[in-house]
Image (cartoon, rainbow, N blue to C red):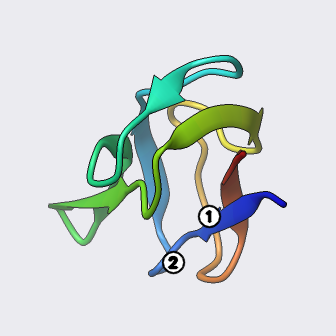
């Protein structure tokens, strides 16, 4: 069963740091958003492998609750 990592706040995606197939550990930074000139990291809640990435660098107008990454 996969773990879905949702965006915690609306804003713009600054940098995606993972791609499908990457192995991650709990606490690894998956992506960094820019929200009101502040950087907001999204971290992995589990150890696993990235199976889906739904966001890309410089993507604008993302909503909170959107599934950004799935980990298996």
Of residues 11 and 55, which is closer to you in this image? 55
Looking at the image, is 49 positioned above or below residue 11?
above
Residue in view at x 42 percent, y 54 percent: 44
Which of the 4 quarters of the picture holds residue 21?
top right
17 lies left or right of 21: left
Q: Position of residue 69 (x, y in %)?
A: 66, 50
Q: Position of residue 31 (x, y in %)?
A: 41, 44
Residue in view at x 67 percent, y 43 percent: 55
9 lies left or right of 1: left
Residues marked 1 and 2 touching at CB (< 8 Å): yes
Residue in view at x 69 percent, y 63 percent: 3
Residue in view at x 58 percent, y 52 percent: 60
Front: mark 1 or 2: 2
Residue tagged 1: 61
> If you read the primary sequence from the N terminus, does the residue marked by circle 1 or circle 2 appear first?
2
Secondary structure, mark 1, is loop
Return the mark for residue 10: 2
Of residues 4 and 55, which is closer to you in this image? 4
The quadrant the C terminus occupies is top right
Return the mark for residue 35: none
Of residues 4 and 60, which is closer to you in this image? 4
């Amino acid at each position: 069963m996969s773990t879905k990592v949702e965006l915690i706040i609306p804003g713009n995606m600054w940098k995606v740091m993972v791609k499908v197939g990457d192995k991650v550990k709990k606490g690894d930074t998956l992506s960094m958003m820019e929200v009101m000139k502040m950087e907001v990291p999204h971290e992995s809640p589990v150890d696993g492998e990235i199976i889906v990435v739904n966001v890309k660098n410089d993507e604008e107008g993302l909503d909170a609750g959107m599934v950004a990454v799935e980990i298996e």
